[in-house]
Amino acid sequence: MQAETVKSEKKQQSFKVEDRARLLVKCPDKPGIVSVLSSFLLKYNANIIESSQYSSDPENGTFFIRLEYYCDHLQKKAPEMEQEFKQIADNYEMTYHFYYLNNRQRSAIYVSKELHCLLELLWEWQNGDLQTDIAVVISNHEDARAVVESYGIPFHYLPANKDIRKEVEAQQIALMEEYDVDLLILARYMQILTPEFVNHFENRIINIHHSFLPAFIGANPYDRAYKRGVKLIGATSHYVTNDLDEGPIIEQDVERVDHRDDVATLKKIGGKIERRVLAKAVKWHLENRIIVEGNKTIVFH
């Protein structure tokens, strides 16, 4: 079995990236959806590499599916495929999106003074585990400049506070457009974003909150967790909405603590959780494994 798995992984890696794509679909559940999608791909001689699906309720619920496929000469076929798929989508009331793997997403990382999440993302990116181009790093402090520029990544220092927030965000939006950014990653960026900014990047801003939400929303969660005598601490990565720390949750994790752990120890343990949770959430997003449904997410691991 292990040999077959290795063989399958090598085969996937051999597929040309320009001939690989993903199709994400959300629609009312009814019989025959998988058959229709499979038949559609078969018509273009596409080979399904990975398929994951979920139904919230087989009788009256919503159906979600993620298909990754390989198709020879996909770039030539794609316009015709997308045009034909519109009729299928209309017939089944589908919300859908085609993602082409040769269109590599571009990311911006926002950070303040604490650099552990930024460093984790840079390491993952350097190792090839984050399929993105890190286009720029934005910070309201200078602390990250040296490490960011050592990777050859542009760094922009934009001091921010509540008095100049809108002016700073206008500069940030301009930079996102200049660098053609698809995804914004808040790697412990300790500034509240305005509704105008958030609405500009709907479901494209991923935050890490140093708490196992919904507990301890807002600032200083480790201090409040210590005072509460918690036995578990955690971190939560979520899409940013205009409700503070209440956006759709992508990934969470926890570790056990006890009465001997002071606030400094909790922060140290929590920092490790934050790093891995944010990196996972970003990876799921970049691999198009997430479908947002209301204030929840369907994540196909």
Image (cartoon, grey):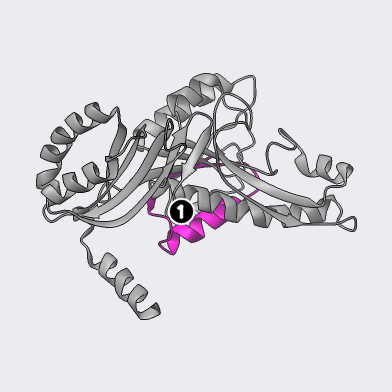
Asked if the stretch drawn in magenta spans residue 113, the answer is yes
Residue, disc 1: 301
Q: Nearer the viewer, residue 239 or 67?
A: 67
Work out whether 33 lies above or below 7.
above
Work out whether 290 lies above or below 174.
below
Q: Position of residue 105 (x, y in %)?
A: 35, 45
Q: Position of residue 14 (x, y in %)?
A: 23, 68
Is 30 on the left-hand or right-hand side of 155?
Answer: left
Is 257 on the left-hand or right-hand side of 35?
Answer: right
Q: Position of residue 26 (x, y in %)?
A: 36, 35
Residue range in magenta is 109-138
| Residue depicted at x 43% and y 45% | 285
Confirm whether residue 146 shows in the render: no
Q: Residue furthest bottom?
A: 3
Q: Nearer the viewer, residue 224 or 71?
A: 71
Residues packed near mark 1 inside 10 Å, few (<14), some (14 to 19) or many (20 plus): few
Q: Position of residue 187 (x, y in %)?
A: 57, 44
Is 229 on the left-hand or right-hand side of 130?
Answer: right
- Quadrant in which the N terminus appears: bottom left
Total label count? Answer: 1
Is 127 on the left-hand or right-hand side of 159?
Answer: left
